[in-house]
Amino acid sequence: MHSDPATVRKILTELGDTWAVVGLSSNQQRAAYGVAGVLQRYGKRVIPVHPKAESVHGERGFPTLSAIPFEIDVVDVFVNSDLAGPVADEAVTIGAKAVWFQLDVIDEAAYERTRAAGLAMVMDRCPAIEIPRLG
C-alpha cells in the first residue's frame, strides 16, 4: 500500500533528479552512503542533509532541509521512524515533490499527512533496490 509500483516509478523517473538524503554523512559504513552513491550513478544529484553538514560524494551538505538554498525534488529519509515524521513535514514545507522513507522507516501518520499535502510518497523501500527493477 505504501509503495505501489506506479508511485515508485513516478518518483524515480518523473519527479526530478535532485534528492536530499536526510541522514547522509561521510561514514562509508552507513547504508545512506552506499545508496547515495547508487543514486548518483543513476543520474541523481544527491544533497547530504545531516547536523554535521558534511560534504559527501562531492556535494555540499546542509544541516536541515530548510537550509538548502535551491529546490529539492525528492527527500530520501534515513533516520529512525520516530524522527521521520518531522522530516516529512519539513519536506512539505520546502515544497518537495516526493518523500521516500527507507527500509524499516515507517510512520503511518506522516505518510497520511504527506499524501494529503499532495506529495508522492513511498515508505519502507530503498531506491537503490528499486531503480534496477525499472529495467
Image (cartoon, grey):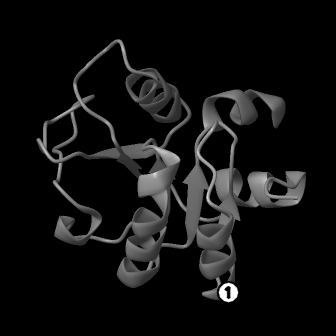
Q: Residues within 10 Å of mark 1 (few under 14, many from 20)?
A: few
Could one spot residue 119 in this view of the protein?
A: no
Front one among 99 and 37? 99
Which residue is the site of mark 1? 116
- Outermost residue toward the top in this view: 29
Could one spot residue 17 in this view of the protein?
A: yes
- Outermost residue toward the bottom in this view: 117
Q: Position of residue 110 (x, y in %)?
A: 59, 70
| SS at mark 1 in the image | helix
* Tag 1: amino acid: Ala
Q: Quadrant of the N terminus?
A: bottom right
Q: Quadrant of the C terminus?
A: top right
Q: Position of residue 120 (x, y in %)?
A: 68, 70
Which quadrant of the figure has residue 78? top left
Front one among 76 and 47? 76
Q: Position of residue 82 (x, y in %)?
A: 47, 54
Please give left or right for residue 124 compared with residue 40 in the image: right
73, above or below 56, in the image: below
- Outermost residue toward the front in this view: 82
Residue at image coords 25%, 31%: 25
Please give left or right for residue 30 compared with residue 60 in the image: right
Residue at image coords 68%, 52%: 123
Please give left or right for residue 134 compared with residue 80 in the image: right
Residue at image coords 22%, 24%: 26
Front one among 82 and 18? 82
Count of numbered marks: 1
114, above or below 118, in the image: above
Q: Position of residue 61 (x, y in %)?
A: 18, 46
Residue at image coords 37%, 73%: 90
